């Protein structure tokens, strides 16, 4: 995760962007097809079906059919694709710039600085993102608590969730290793969740027993 800011033989993230542009387009198309609801409305009732699940026509959340017809979006994937890719590219360049400034202002060895700086930038980016999703009318509500997922680590959007934190979020092995404080016996402790670093756990430090990186698959067999 933090290695995204490391200079490789192929260059920095901004140099490699073109190689990933097709994946960005596919991600946006998947979001549009699987998550963007139909905009059909009749007598104040909106259709909740997305493009991939619109075979039955227009339906309310209760499942009641409120109309017959095709998917009617208020968002055009093709029109937004180029703008989407440009926004992502600009954001990567901005984060890369923040990381470079952090490294320049540090007096630590470059190997330590690269990791700590990238983690700092990543933590701030997560905080900004979830902070921008604040719940109207609830200024003290923690927006990150609204989001949980058992298929993808919401901290890095890459790893498989494995380790549960008391706030309800589940992070992957790499995020647990990077954000936890290592102790003897492979135990890592947490005082905060990386998804909302401004919220301290009620009981700290929170311990996580982590499987060694070199450990293989373990199977419990109960006979008799």
Image: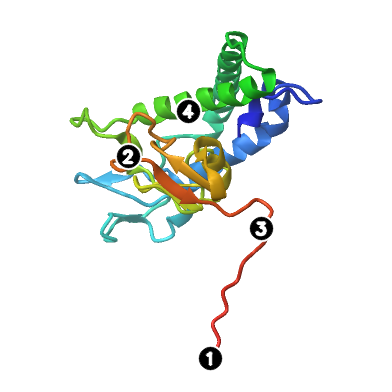
Q: Position of residue 83 (x, y in %)?
A: 55, 23
Q: CA distance from mark 4 to mark 1?
A: 49 Å
Q: Which residue is mark 3?
A: 215
Task: Out of 58 and 53, give the one closest to the viewer.
Answer: 53
Q: Nearer the viewer, mark 2 or mark 4?
A: 2
Residue under the point 50% across and 44% down? 188
Camera-nearest residue between 96 and 178: 178
The kind of secondary structure element at disc 4 is helix
Front label number (4 vs 1): 1
Mark 2 highlights which residue? Answer: 201
Residue 145: percent from the left, percent from the top? Answer: 32, 41
**66 with respect to 112 (left or right):** left
On screen, residue 216 above or below 182: below
Task: Find the residue positioned furthest to the top.
Answer: 105
User: Residue 123: which numbered mark, if any?
Assistant: 4
Mark earlier in primary sequence (2, 1): 2
Whether residue 9 is visible, yes or no, is yes
Q: Quadrant of residue 216?
A: bottom right
Q: CA distance from mark 2 to mark 4?
A: 17 Å
Numbered disc 2: secondary structure: loop
Say few, some or many: other residues with alpha carbon within 10 Å of mark 2 (under 14 / 14 to 19 / 20 or more).
some
Instruction: State if disc 4 and disc 3 touch (CB < 8 Å).
Output: no
How far is mark 2 from mark 1, CA to CA? 43 Å
Few, some or many residues within 10 Å of mark 3 (<14, 14–19, 20+): few
- Report which residue position mark 1 lands on: 224
Cα–Cα gap, marks 3 and 1: 27 Å
């Amino acid at each position: 995760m933090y290695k995204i800011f490391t200079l490789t033989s192929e260059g920095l993230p901004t140099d490699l962007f073109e190689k990933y542009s097709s994946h960005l387009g596919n991600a946006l198309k998947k979001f549009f097809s699987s998550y963007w609801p139909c905009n059909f409305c009749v007598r104040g009732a909106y259709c909740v079906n997305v493009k991939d699940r619109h075979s039955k026509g227009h339906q309310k959340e209760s499942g009641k059919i409120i109309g017959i017809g095709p998917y009617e979006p208020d968002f055009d994937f093709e029109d937004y694709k180029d703008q989407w890719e440009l926004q992502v590219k600009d954001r990567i360049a901005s984060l890369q710039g923040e990381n470079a400034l952090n490294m320049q202002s540090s007096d630590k060895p470059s190997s330590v600085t690269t990791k700590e700086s990238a983690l700092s930038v990543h933590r701030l980016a997560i905080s900004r993102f979830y902070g921008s999703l604040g719940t109207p009318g609830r200024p003290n509500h923690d927006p990150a608590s609204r989001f949980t997922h058992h298929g993808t680590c919401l901290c890095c959007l890459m790893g498989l969730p494995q380790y549960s934190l008391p706030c309800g979020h589940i992070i992957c092995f790499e995020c647990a290793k990077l954000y936890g404080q290592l102790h003897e016996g492979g135990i890592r402790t947490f005082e905060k969740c990386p998804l909302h670093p401004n919220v301290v756990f009620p009981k700290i430090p929170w311990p996580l027993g982590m499987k060694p990186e070199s450990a293989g698959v373990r199977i419990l067999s109960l006979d008799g």
